Amino acid sequence: MMNAFKSPVARLAHLFQQSRDAWKAKALERQQRLRAAQVKIRDLEHSRAHWKARALKAERAAAAAPSDDAPRAVRRLPEDVPPVGHHYSVTVMQLTMRMYLHAGFGSRGVARALTLFGALLPMATPAHTTVLNWVYRCGLAILTRPLEWRTDWIYVADHTIALGASKCLVILGIPAAALRQTGYSPRHDAMQVLAVEITTHSTGAWVAAVLGRVAQRTGTPVQIVADHGSDLRKGIALFQEQAPACVYTYDISHRIATLLKAGRGHDARWESLLAHCRTAWSSFQQTDLAFLLPPRQRTKARFMNLDIQVRWAQRLLAYHDRGDFSAICAQQVLTWPAWEHLRARFGTTRAHPLRAIVGIRYPDKAAFCQALQTHADLARDALDDTFWHHTDTGYGRFIEGFAWLLPYREDLVGYAQLMAQSKLIQSHLKSTGLQRSSPESLQAALPLPSTLTPRTAIFTQQVLAHVALEAAKIPADSIWLATSDIIESVFGKYKCFTAKGPLKEIGKLVLAIPAFIADLTIPLIREAMESVRTIDVEQWAETHIGTSMLARRRHALIDSVPNTKTA
């Protein structure tokens, strides 16, 4: 082949290489042009579908509008106009953020749901990162907007913690004048987020400084409701030195939990009951008794949720007393203990024929009774509960799993009364607020001391003493908050968002707190999207949070070992 060329081989090789490189460059250029054309075609198709949907919507709006003799131009609705610098309409942003914040969808779930409904709702689908970005920007805009200057602000403050050393102090606010409209038990939408501050070392001085900065924006509060955390208590005390008219109210829910802990923490019977519950979980969670297992015990706030365990135990005892264990197992079998019981009651002569069916399993009680009548002349009414317990397979299985609960019947009466009393006290204060007359009205609403067990009576007196102490701080003719339950509810919803992340750390998701508390209206979203940039969110996170734990983990745990499956 090479003999057909007259040029030297070295020159031919150089020419062939140049030719190859030229064709290769042309092929790469064609691929780039093809890729660019594909991207452009895709964008044009999306744009065409987007504008077609908007045009159809405008046509439908024009057709539905009353017609005049003079033609009118079709006007775009404000919610259809994207914010400046954005591609998506405010309606899409509002729907997307409400699905994420209030419907329980994750950021990826929102994108998938909008994709599924794309045929019915012609709209572009944002990426999951875009969903989170919108939430962050709205949250930061709400957090940094000016607050109304008032003289009757009520603060509710508390910390939330997560994986890592950071702690987040959240301060919610509500005007005292608005409490009556909320029934003295405000919901999320009645509160305003006044501060979200993050630190790795919370001290009283730091808490006082945060309260001072918030007071400069809102006016001095008339009341601060919080638990008795050491840093919070000290910080509020330091703040009161500058604002002596401000009242610090110890949250009634935490106080009741503290009293319950003091009473139940050294109660050997209660600790034994909880230990049996834990043992039952580990022993029967993969068995036929799993549907009767007690609720799982919380690692935190255990003494604020004791009624769950007590209510389960009472219901299980009621299930035992009804005597119908067919939900566990409907089979009946004549066991030897049951036969011996019959022989002791009716004699060997009458019981002997039943030896033939000892050990035979019958599908239900009716079939078993028919077998008894076939082999012996024993009437069903003559058979006592002891006999039926011996023959009932479901009962035997119940006793195997929960016989330990039966000796606690009398204890549960006292526990239930204690729980009912604490719930009644909290419900009364949450519905009527905290005022000077709260001790008297509360005592009138409670059962008479003579109807209570000694332990419950002592507990009630302790709570009434606490209420009297806190109520004495409230000015006359004023009704303020008695509990900080609202902020516990806010933290609970916030943790639903962090639970979906790889590391449950305090990060940018704290900006979801202002976002889900506020009413995300069209004007609010438009203002937030146009006033807060993505870089503003990043700068806020860098200032308040620093490098995230996930980013540090990825940097530190770089996999330097080659993959043996692909190497």
Image (tube, helix red, strand yellow):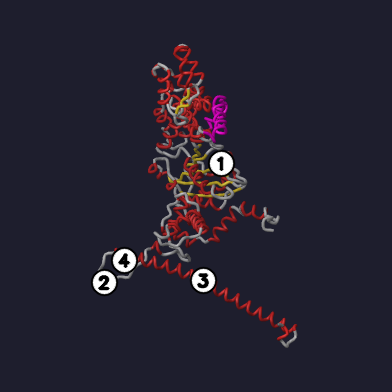
Classify 10 Å Cα crowding around label 1: few (below 14), some (14-19), many (20 and above). Answer: many
Say if 349 sits above or below 191 in the image.
above
Say if 228 sits above or below 114 in the image.
above
Where is residue 308 shown, x and y percent of the image?
48, 33
The residue that disc 3 covers is 38
Please tell me whether mark 1 sits on a helix, a strand or a loop: helix
At x 49%, y 61%, the residue is 531
Mark sitting on residue 398: none
Please tell me whether mark 2 sits on a helix, a strand or a loop: loop
Q: Nearer the viewer, mark 1 or mark 2?
A: 2
The residue that disc 1 covers is 232
Q: CA distance from mark 2 to mark 4?
A: 13 Å
Callout 3 amino acid: Gln
Classify 10 Å Cα crowding around label 2: few (below 14), some (14-19), many (20 and above). Answer: few
Q: Is residue 263 magenta?
A: yes
1 and 3 marks in contact (CB < 8 Å): no
Compare marks 1 and 4 and give the one earlier in the sequence.
Answer: 4
The residue that disc 2 covers is 70
Q: CA distance from mark 1 to mark 3?
A: 60 Å
Where is residue 511 shown, x and y percent of the image?
52, 52
Compare marks 1 and 3 and give the one earlier in the sequence.
Answer: 3
Q: Nearer the viewer, mark 2 or mark 3?
A: 3
Stretch of the chain drawn in magenta: 258-287
The residue that disc 4 covers is 62
State the quadrant of the C terminus.
Answer: bottom right
Q: CA distance from mark 1 to mark 4?
A: 59 Å
Compare marks 2 and 3 and give the one earlier in the sequence.
Answer: 3
